[in-house]
Amino acid sequence: MAFSKCFRASAHPSPATRREARRRLIGFCAGFVCLGFPWLVGTAHAGKEKRIRVTTTLTMLSSIAEAIGGDRVSATSIAAPGYNPHFIEPRPSDILRLGRSDYFIHMGLDLELWRGPLVEAAVNPRLLPGAVGDVDASVGIDLLEVPGVGLSRASGDIHIFGNPHYWLDPENVKRMAEQFAGRLAAGAPGSSDLFRENLRSFSRSVDEHMASWKSALSPFQGQRLVAYHNSWPYFAHAFNLRIDLFVEPKPGISPSGSHLEGLVAQMKRDEVRIIIVEPFQPRRIAESVAKRTSGKVVELWQNPSGKDSYIEMMDRNVHTLVEALRASRRGSAP
Amino acid sequence: MSLKSTAPVVALFLVFASAQAQAQNESSAGKRGLSSFNPEIGIVADIVGRASEEEPADPFGEDEGIDRFSFREAQLVFGAFVDPFMRADFAFVFSDRGDPEIEEAYLSFLALPGRIRSRVGKFRSKIGKVNLKDLNALQFVNEPLVIQEYLGDEGMSLTGINASRIFGLGPFALELTGEFFEGGQDVLFSGVRGEPIYVGHLKGYVDFTPRSNFEIGLNYASGDRNIAADGDPVDLRSTNLVGVDLTYQWKRTSTLKVRLTGEGYRVDRDRRSGDPQAPDVDGGFLNADVRFAPRWSAGARYDRVEPLELDPATRHDDRAGYAVYATFHQSEFAWIRLQYQLTREPDGFRNDEVYLQFRAQIGVDRHGLQ
Ligand SMILES: [Zn+2]
């Protein structure tokens, strides 16, 4: 038996005694360093911070957590806004941060394909699936494009539980904020009034902006658009647009030449002129399609950059889109 | 069994039991999604064709794909939370050239105090970066020569226990890992089960910019090798492996990135006085890998290794390898790879090889984060 063997040396002196004794010493030292020292380093940090530490997968989620938590919360996110949220490679510093967090807020479903191993690596029992600090933002959201029975990756690599880009409908974001307020209050009952107040003002602000976004987009009701990836069905639903043509043949699959041919033909036939790309998508491919259809590529964001909030991001998205739609309407006018 | 020998086992039991119990009090987890038996399942198909100048020892035998097309691996992966404090993971490998094999089977403790991560069971040892990955998940078709030569054709995966902890130090993230295996590795070590192998690993990681990062790993493995002739009583001498691995990564987007990796190892063996055999040997590899388009990546690898069986009289006769490869990524889950490799053997033989690999994955990928 291995465990007993390595500690048996002194009971049965042999020529190998010295070697084994040295080994045992190495083992114990390694054990001490592994278990003891880092623990001390770790606990030295504990107890200093009183704010609730929230780590989110996307900047979108930290933006809402900050809006609800105010001063009581310090929120950081793992995925930089300019990268594809489906395929992020978490860094050791992210594991470290998650280990010290009180809450882990994520989009649920299969949005963050990289989430599972990250949470396990953090060794933070609060954040394991279903535990007190695990917040799945998709709870309570009415999903679109939920597939029927028998779906496989033949229908694409991702979006297998339904379309996970639900936060691009501001109504859903109000529901998410409501859940966050409840979950934060459960952990800090003393601040629940603050969270409720922040929730009220956040929802009010969303409602006000929603009215102006809707009126800005109202001249373009039912307008058809192309998107690189199928990120925009909730946005389309919220603002009565039709975004059902994609540069990707299926979510997560890079386009082939024949698929692009088909897309160009359909855009020409149906006079679709605008292609939505996100900052991390290969703009070159979208530009080549736009060139052949006298269309225009517009860049919209699904996650706020570090500097702006969710509302500011949506504001910019709506205005970018309205400008492009106006220009294309002028361009196509006789 | 003496009191002395059982004491460490009992102590270990008490540490784990009390730690897990404490975690249970702290987390008071809602059991949503944990109680039902629905393991994550993944299957990887790895099909490799190989054309080589090497003569097969037995043309009808099971030699690894010499001028043949083989189902190198069908890997079946299961994983599930046992309860809110533990996870179980299994990887089985089936192949058309051998018996099914348990590649990994381990329990992970997810709720130990002090954020210590621990595994018990059979798992890939934390030596360098390549050894941690499944053969089918590497950026090239085959293991670098140094890994094949010192850790075995499919790397080193043994039964034991490990503990690791990540901690921050200024801009660095450090990870310290200690592993204890019961032996059973016969490439570098004696292969005798019950003769322990210790592994220590220290990783340092730093983000240079939001787009680039650097990682260094220091590796140490210690055990015994048997120098007795066949039939003689076992005569064990200590064998140590020390190594360093370096990785630099620059990433513009998920589909535009550059990765430079290198690993170097030295084997230091205790000899009988006057024994000319088993000199100290070393080896390593360098790899550059570039994802330059949404669907394409390519790279090159340079290998050099002094074989463990190196003849001390002609000690500069090392094996060298030069490989170039290109990969077509059909999606994130399926790829096709072409690799050309030139290997110069110690006897001067030049072996040209061409590999063609088809690799597809269904379901979960358990090796996303190492
Ligand atoms: Zn998506």
Image (cartoon, rainbow, N blue to C red):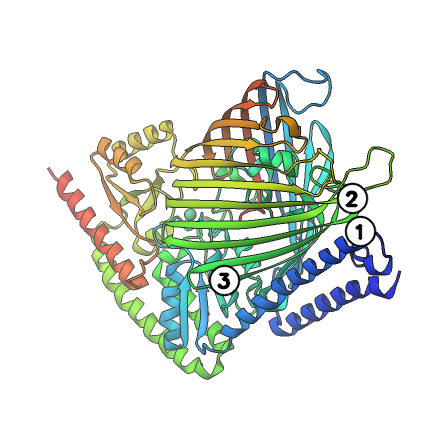
Q: Is residue A99 toward the left or the right of residue B117 in the image?
A: left
Tag 3 subunit: A
For badge 1, the amino acid type reads Ala
What is the C-alpha distance between the residues marked 1 and 3? 41 Å
Q: Is residue B261 toward the left or the right of residue A220 in the image?
A: right
The residue to which callout 2 is attached is: B236
Q: Residue at x 38, y 58 (%)?
A: A167
The residue to which callout 1 is attached is: A16
SS at mark 3 in the image: helix
Residue A49 vertical position relative to residue B153 in the rendered view, above or below: below
SS at mark 1 in the image: loop
Q: Are marks 2 and 3 on the same chain?
A: no
For badge 2, the amino acid type reads Leu
What is the C-alpha distance between the residues marked 2 and 3? 41 Å
Cβ–Cβ under 8 Å for marks 2 and 1: yes
- Most distant residue in the right direction: B1
The residue to which callout 3 is attached is: A96
List x then y, in percent, for residue A190: 46, 84
Q: Quadrant of the C terminus of chain A?
A: top left
Residue B75 visible at all: no
List x then y, in percent, for residue A201: 32, 75
SS at mark 2 in the image: strand
For badge 3, the amino acid type reads Leu
Cβ–Cβ under 8 Å for marks 2 and 3: no
* Residue B233 quadrant: top right
Q: Is residue B260 toward the left or the right of residue A267 in the image?
A: right
Q: Residue at x 77, y 64 (%)?
A: B8
**Mark 3 lies within 8 Å of ligand 1 (Cβ measured):** no
